[in-house]
Image: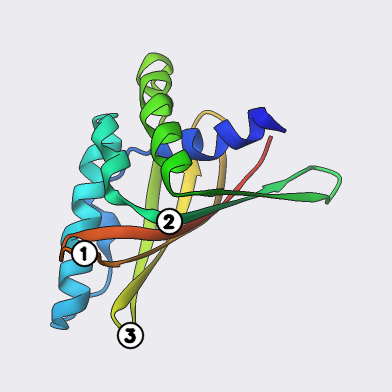
């Protein structure tokens, strides 16, 4: 089970995004700021930058839904500082194995003071695509942060 806790941020950390993933053309200032923040996330993933961890709120929640071939699922949840440390460590591993994950079909939806970003995540090494979702917004100091992320994965 401990290994699965490590897999979640590793999966999320192997992301190489392409600029076409931003989607929707809108003039909503909140959506535009979320798109700019997503571009920062993209760059950090693409460069295997361990400072990606700083983009997570100390109170962030990450959920990975592990889908098994027999139809069974496991839900793995991590919070705050554990996410940050796991992301830092996984960036090192991601760079070593050069695992590529790409995002497509981004959709941005304003939810009060937050924005939900929903994309398709494609793992090139394992050749599968799954939903990936972030809830982002301003933290207490005004900086944009990731508050929740939900991803599916396959063994």
Q: In the rendering, which numbered label is found on residue 60?
A: 2
What residue is disc 1 on? 35
Q: Is residue 89 above or below residue 141?
A: above
Q: Earlier in the sequence, mark 1 or mark 3?
A: 1
Which one is in front in this view, the residue at disc 1 or the one at disc 3?
A: 3
Residue 104: x, y in percent?
Answer: 38, 55
Q: Is residue 78 above or below residue 15?
A: below
Q: Earlier in the sequence, mark 2 or mark 3?
A: 2
Depth order, front residue of 20/6: 6
Residue 128: x, y in percent?
Answer: 58, 42
Residue 20: x, y in percent?
Answer: 25, 55
- Residue 74 in view (yes/no): yes
Q: Is residue 29 above or below residue 150?
A: below
What residue is disc 3 on? 112
User: How far apart are labels 2 and 3 at the CA level?
Assistant: 17 Å
User: How far apart are labels 1 and 3 at the CA level?
Assistant: 16 Å
Which one is in front in this view, the residue at disc 2 or the one at disc 3?
A: 2
Depth order, front residue of 28/56: 56
Q: In the rendering, which numbered label is found on residue 65?
A: none
Q: Residue at the location (22% across, 51% down)?
A: 19
Q: Residue at the location (30% across, 57% down)?
A: 21
* CA neighbours of label 3 inside 10 A, class few (<14), some (14 to 19), many (20+): few
């Amino acid at each position: 089970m401990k290994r699965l806790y490590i897999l979640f941020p590793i999966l999320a950390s192997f992301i190489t995004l392409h600029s076409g993933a931003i989607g929707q053309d809108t003039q909503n200032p909140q959506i535009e700021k979320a798109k700019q923040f997503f571009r920062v996330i993209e760059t950090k993933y693409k460069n295997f930058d361990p400072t990606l961890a700083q983009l997570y709120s100390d109170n962030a929640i990450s959920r990975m839904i592990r889908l098994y071939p027999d139809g069974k699922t496991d839900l793995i949840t991590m919070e705050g500082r554990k996410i940050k440390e796991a992301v830092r460590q996984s960036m090192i591993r991601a760079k070593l194995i050069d695992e590529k994950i790409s995002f497509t079909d981004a959709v941005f939806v304003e939810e009060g003071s937050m924005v939900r970003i929903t994309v398709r995540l494609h793992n090139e090494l394992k050749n599968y695509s799954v939903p990936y979702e972030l809830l982002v917004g301003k933290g207490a100091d005004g900086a944009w942060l990731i508050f929740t992320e939900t991803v599916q994965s396959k063994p």
